[in-house]
Amino acid sequence: TVDKNYSKHEIHWNGSISYGNTIFIGDLNHLSSERYLPNVALGIKFNKEYNTKHAIQFSIITGKNSGQDGENNNESLTNFRSQYAQAYIAFRKSLTKTGIKTPQLHCITGVGYYYADALLTNTVGEYSEVSSDDVWSLFFPLGLELSYYIQEKWGTVLGVTNNIFSRD
């Protein structure tokens, strides 16, 4: 048999590489400090498109996080730094019309695994205690991506993803 609509069922792959600052919002929010570098991440994402509206997204991200719980006024101060890696698989749905030179909005939701090598420093007055720990968690990414393609294979993507962790 011959499928006359073969081109309508073709599965496409696309991907993106990103690097930039991240925002850590948790119980140890990052405060301005010359001792800590900005939180940064490098990510690689691949999308397997099943049709113009639906895709599966595979993502691998590595980065550095740091944070602290307050200013040091001879009181208790907790600082942390971590090097992390995470991977997830997510369902990606287009919320707008797709096409070249058309802004596109996508919603993603999925499940992933997070691992970090963390260094924690607790300071009380002049006494400091340093400990390290391996941190892992399942997490659930929820996000929006805005993309714009200037031609068939070239475009830009602006994404915001919130990861909901199962462990702290």
Image: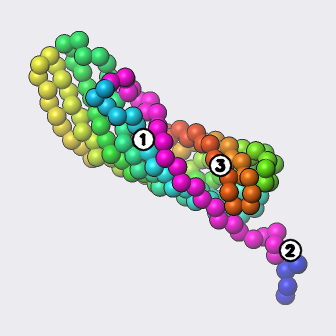
For mark 3, give the secondary structure. Answer: strand
Q: Is 13 one of the magenta-colored residues?
A: yes
Residue at the outermost top position: 73
For mark 1, give the secondary structure. Answer: strand
Residue tagged 3: 156
Q: Position of residue 106 (x, y in %)?
A: 69, 46
**Amino acid of disc 1:** Val
Residue tagged 2: 5
The image quadrant of residue 120 is top left
Q: Is residue 160 left or right of residue 152?
A: left
Report, in whole angstroms, how far the alpha carbon at label 1 lies from the one at label 2. 45 Å
Near mark 2 (Cα within 10 A), the count class, few <14, some 14-19 or many ≥20, is: few
Near mark 3 (Cα within 10 A), the count class, few <14, some 14-19 or many ≥20, is: few
Q: Is residue 72 left or right of residue 56?
A: left
**Amino acid of disc 3:** Thr
From the image, state whether disc 1 or disc 2 is nearer to you. 1
For mark 2, give the secondary structure. Answer: loop
Q: Residue at point 44% right, 45% down?
A: 41
Find the magenta span and give its range: 6-33
Q: Quadrant of the C terminus?
A: top left
**Amino acid of disc 2:** Asn
Residue tagged 1: 40
Which of the pair 86/159 is nearer the observer? 159
Q: Is residue 158 left or right of residue 62?
A: right
Q: Residue at point 72% right, 44% down?
A: 105
